[in-house]
Amino acid sequence: VDVASSDSRTVAAWFEGKVNFAPPAPELGAAGYKLGGGRVEYVGGRMAAALAYQFGAHTISVFLWPLTSAEAKPPASAVAEHGYRILGWNGNGLRCYAVADLTEHDLRDFATAFQAKAAP
């Protein structure tokens, strides 16, 4: 991470001026997911906000960018590649992907918690 913090306001503020949107960085500690910080990444040639959460010994990376008209259809269900699961969704005008070495069930639980707390 480029900004290491478990405080969602600190992480969200760090992204100001670095990406052209306001990524949510919800606090999910009550659900068992500790925010570790954020960074800027490039995914498919586009700038994305990346958040890191800890779940036990596992790191969950969440990549977010503004939704385009070409991405209006939600992504396919979870896929597994190289030992990681990838789960995507659209929410609040953003395309979101969570990536971790978790079971599909655990990754879906994380995504549900993230979406509930990230909603305006």
Image (spheres, helix red, strand yellow):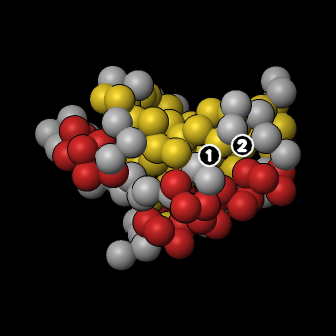
Label placed on residue 86: 2
The residue at the point 43 percent across, 73 percent down is 119
Quick check: 20 left or right of 34? left
Q: Position of residue 21 (x, y in %)?
A: 26, 52
Classify residue 81 by image quadrant: top right
The residue at the point 82 percent across, 24 percent down is 82
Which residue does the numbered mark 1 point to in the structure image? 98
Residue 92 seen in the figure: yes
The residue at the point 58 percent across, 38 percent down is 54
Q: In this view, does 32 lie above or below 43?
A: below
Quick check: 63 left or right of 85? left
Q: Is the Cβ of the residue at disc 2 closer than 8 Å to that at disc 1? A: yes
Q: Quadrant of the C terminus?
A: bottom left
Upstream in sequence: badge 2 or badge 1: 2
The residue at the point 61 percent across, 61 percent down is 31
Q: What residue type is labelled 2?
A: Ile
Label placed on residue 58: none
Residue 49 seen in the figure: no
Q: Is residue 63 above or below residue 45?
A: below
Q: Position of residue 69 (x, y in %)?
A: 45, 62
Task: Find numbered disc 2 in the image and state the secondary structure of the residue it sits on.
Answer: strand
Q: Position of residue 112 (x, y in %)?
A: 64, 66
Q: Is residue 69 above or below residue 63?
A: below
Q: How far apart are marks 2 and 1 (CA)?
A: 6 Å
* Residue with the most extreme bottom position: 120
* Residue with the most extreme left position: 17
Task: Find numbered disc 1 in the image and state the secondary structure of the residue it sits on.
Answer: strand
Q: What residue type is labelled 1?
A: Ala
Q: How many marks?
A: 2
Q: Residues within 10 Å of mark 2 (few under 14, many from 20)?
A: many
Q: Where is residue 45 in the image (x, y as percent from the top left)?
A: 44, 29
Q: In which quarter of the image is the N terminus?
A: top left
